[in-house]
Image (cartoon, grey):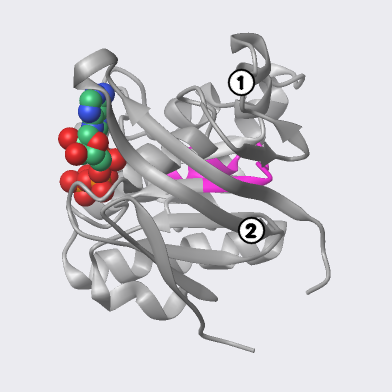
């Protein structure tokens, strides 16, 4: 691919707790992700997947080693620098976290608030993104009236509307049946390719592994099994 890495982790370890309760959760993690790449991370419950995702997403302070996101070092970074990095990342989590009091379109539009666009433009972009995920006819529905798969597609539209450089997704298909789960990851894959952003996706769902360019496996805090799926 030859493109610059969006994420570069070198010997990243992570500890929870202090003193006698201090416990190491991640051990010397090395990982790089480049633009347009889709990487799936698997691993048993408690192996550290969410911890790693939140470190990369600037949602938790990185402690040791080197963790560069978009060229910015996050180990030892101040809160302000972490917040700055978050602007370039789209997050999709299991519970989709949509606000019930807002329509699908307003939920997507919220993601534009931190970006320098007019309200009119934000409205147009939000509608376009809902159309891209196949929900143009549901734009004015409140989440309560949408199916699980539709809600997750709204969450994808919200994560992608600001054209992030990178998407971090934690079990995005966990609450969905096979068909809806498949539709959701295919939309993510298509949009990521079009926008050239990288995706790091945590999943237990074996049915979606084939959308990845590469899978990585985390076990007891150690990363292994890096395997290329496509040349
Ligand atoms: N805030 C915290 N304080 C202390 N320990 C934590 C904290 N968050 C997670 N842990 C511990 O760190 C380890 C890794 O947790 P993590 O949530 O990253 O795993 P996971 O692979 O995402 O699990 P799951 O698949 O169940 O979500 C677990 O042993 C967990 O109990």
Give me the residue at 30% from left, 60% from top.
203
Q: List the residue tagged with mark 1.
A: 82
Give the camera-side residue of 181 and 1: 1
> Taking 223 as reference, is 157 above or below it?
above
Q: Secondary structure at mark 2?
A: strand
* Highlighted magenta segment, given as a residue range: 155-167
Q: List the residue tagged with mark 2.
A: 33
Residue 122 belongs to the span the image colors magenta: no
Task: In the rendered structure, find residue 109 and report the number of the disc placed on it.
Answer: none
Residue 94 on image: x %, y %: 27, 43
Residue 201 on image: x %, y %: 42, 56
Give me the residue at 25% from left, 51% from top.
47
Based on the displayed image, in which of its 4 quarters is residue 124 positioned? top right
- Tell me whether the residue at label 2 lies in contact with that at label 1, contact meaning CB atoms closer than 8 angstroms: no
Is residue 139 something one can see in this rendering?
no
Based on the displayed image, in which of its 4 quarters is residue 26 positioned? top left
């Amino acid at each position: 691919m030859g493109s610059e890495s969006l994420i570069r982790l070198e010997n990243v370890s992570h500890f929870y707790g202090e003193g006698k309760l201090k416990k190491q959760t991640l051990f010397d993690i090395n990982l790089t992700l480049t633009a347009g790449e889709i990487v799936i991370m698997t691993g048993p419950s408690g192996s550290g997947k969410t911890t790693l995702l939140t470190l990369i997403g600037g949602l938790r302070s990185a402690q040791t080693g080197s963790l560069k996101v978009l060229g910015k070092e996050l180990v030892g970074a101040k809160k302000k620098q972490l917040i700055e990095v978050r602007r370039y990342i789209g997050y999709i989590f299991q519970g989709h976290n949509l606000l019930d009091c807002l329509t699908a379109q307003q939920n997507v539009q919220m993601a534009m608030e931190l970006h320098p666009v007019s309200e009119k433009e934000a409205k147009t972009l939000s509608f376009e993104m809902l159309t891209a995920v196949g929900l143009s006819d549901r734009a004015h529905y409140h989440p309560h009236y949408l199916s699980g798969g539709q809600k997750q597609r709204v969450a994808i539209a919200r994560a992608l509307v600001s054209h992030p450089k990178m998407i971090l997704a934690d079990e995005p298909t966990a609450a969905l049946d096979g068909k809806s789960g498949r539709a959701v990851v295919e939309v993510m894959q298509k949009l990521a390719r079009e926008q050239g952003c990288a995706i790091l996706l945590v999943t237990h769902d074996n049915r979606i592994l084939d959308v990845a360019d590469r899978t990585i496996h985390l076990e007891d805090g150690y990363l292994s099994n890096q395997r290329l799926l496509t040349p």
